[in-house]
Amino acid sequence: MIGPREPTEIPGVVELRDWFGYWPDFHDAEVISLHLNRRGNSFLRVHTWDATKEVDEKGNYVQTKHVVVEFILESVSDLSLNEFSGQNVISGLGIEKTASGFRLELGACYGLAGTIDAERVSLRTTPGKPS
């Protein structure tokens, strides 16, 4: 899973990189919602964070920099998704340029996984945990 090679070609990527100081891999991130439209924009909302090397009293890694990332997908042209569930944890999320736009790849972990192709993609970040 990789991030965009040219961050300026996707609006909002620079802001997400600035939030973390790097492009996040979205490991163990949770898909909050996916809203698909035949016409107009579709939306994928993902909650991710930075896992530190610190461990809390329960033995869990301490998480910081929580953020909800909304992927705005213009003109979805194809998708292949499976395993939607009550909780949708991904192993990672990558964006790559294709001949017809962009492909988002949601790595399988628990629940939703697959690919979404869209003509254009932009990102909107909302710092904090989802409500």
Image (spheres, helix red, strand yellow):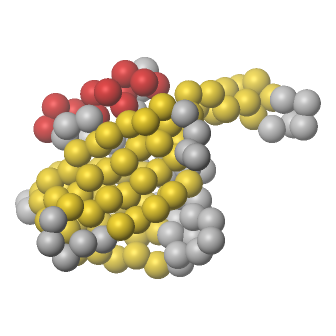
- Say which residue appears at 17% left-offset and 59% top-offset: 74
Answer left or right for 118 relative to 81.
left
Answer left or right for 108 relative to 97.
right
Answer left or right for 3 relative to 28.
left
Q: How many marks?
A: 0
Answer left or right for 52 relative to 67.
right
- Residue reaching furthest to the left: 99
Q: Position of residue 19 (x, y in %)?
A: 42, 24
Question: As rendered, which of 11 and 113 lies closer to the eye?
Answer: 11
- Say which residue appears at 23% left-offset and 58% top-offset: 73
- Say which residue appears at 29% left-offset and 66% top-offset: 116
- Say which residue appears at 32% left-offset and 27% top-offset: 15
Q: Position of residue 95 (x, y in %)?
A: 30, 50
Whether residue 85 is situated above or below residue 59 in the rendered picture: below
Whether residue 84 is situated above or below residue 6 in the rendered picture: below
For residue 105, say whether it is visible: yes
| Residue 4 image-quadrant placement | top left
For residue 98, say whether it is visible: no
- Residue reaching furthest to the right: 57
Q: Position of residue 35 (x, y in %)?
A: 35, 67
- Residue reaching furthest to the front: 131
